Amino acid sequence: MKTISKQILAILLILGAFGGSVFGQKAPVKNIVLVHGAFVDGSGWEGVYKELTKKGYHVSVTQQTLLSYEDDVKQVNRIIDQQDRSCILVGHSYGGAIITTAGNNPKVAGLVYIAAHAPDEGESEADNGKKYPSAYKSLIKGNDGFDYINPANFPSDFAGGVTKEKADFMAVSQTPTKDLVFHAIIHNPAWKLKPVWYMVAKADKIINPDLERLYAKRANSKKTVEIEGASHCVFMTHPKEAVELIIEASKGSQ
């Protein structure tokens, strides 16, 4: 019995040396933070949330106000700071610009961009959009400094592939977004230091798919997946594919 106990103790010590890993394979990052983009809120992540929680992940969904880039980054950092250990930070659309800065938080182990902006030092997503023009023409700039998408065009331009009932509701419940957030200049992009995974929506009308490909290539994405026929709402229409990429990031960020 003493010999067996010593053997068990030795095994436990070895596992401890690997930080709880087996044969040097570290456990995946179990905390996931989902960051929404402009004109919508965090509820669009529901499908991804459900799939991830079924698989045992702890998921947090941010609800930034879209009033100021700096404040949005602070709000996302607040959620990151609440995590009990490292996390994977996932951003959609303008949320990608947010995680490009918030990703510098020490608790962030990896970044996942879902049809999202990933500007470089000194860039803004608005300027990058001019270099790679998008297909939609339905953006309305209000006299009060807020932007929104014409509700009549929202389903086809923003939410292609989403059920008509859901897309129509998203159109009339969209969150107007301060125009200035799209012009925020990025400094110290986190993708230069943190590993990246990227999902390209091949039928995206809001962000030019070629711009998405540039972002992925420039960030040395460890894996880039392209979803055929997917609109800007690829995270809603293809939640399983998004979850697969996030899980791969959770396993590859340690």
Image: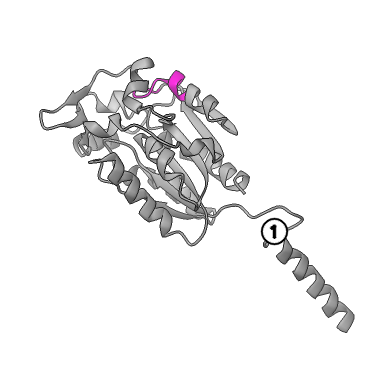
Amino acid identity at mark 1:
Ser
* Front residue (pair 140, 77): 77
Quadrant in the rendering for residue 124: top left
Q: Which residue is mark 1?
A: 21
Q: Residues within 10 Å of mark 1 (few under 14, many from 20)?
A: some
Q: Is residue 245 magenta?
A: no
User: What residue lies at 48% left-to-right and 39% top-to-bottom?
Assistant: 190
Residue 94 located left or right of residue 115: left
Residue 127: percent from left, percent from top: 33, 22
Q: Which residues are magenta?
A: 204-212
Visible residue check, residue 62: no
Residue 229: percent from left, percent from top: 45, 22
Total numbered badges shown on the rendered structure: 1
User: What residue lies at 56% left-to-right and 29% top-to-bottom?
Assistant: 224
Residue 120 located left or right of residue 248: left
Model colouring: one colour
Is 145 drawn above or below residue 109 in the view shown?
above
Residue 195: percent from left, percent from top: 56, 39
Query: Residue farthest to the left?
Result: 143
User: What residue lies at 49% left-to-right and 22% top-to-bottom?
Assistant: 214
Visible residue check, residue 30: yes
Which quadrant, please, contains the N terminus?
Answer: bottom right
Quadrant in the rendering for residue 17: bottom right
Quadrant in the rendering for residue 223: top right
Residue 55 located left or right of residue 118: right
Is 62 drawn above or below residue 122 in the view shown?
below
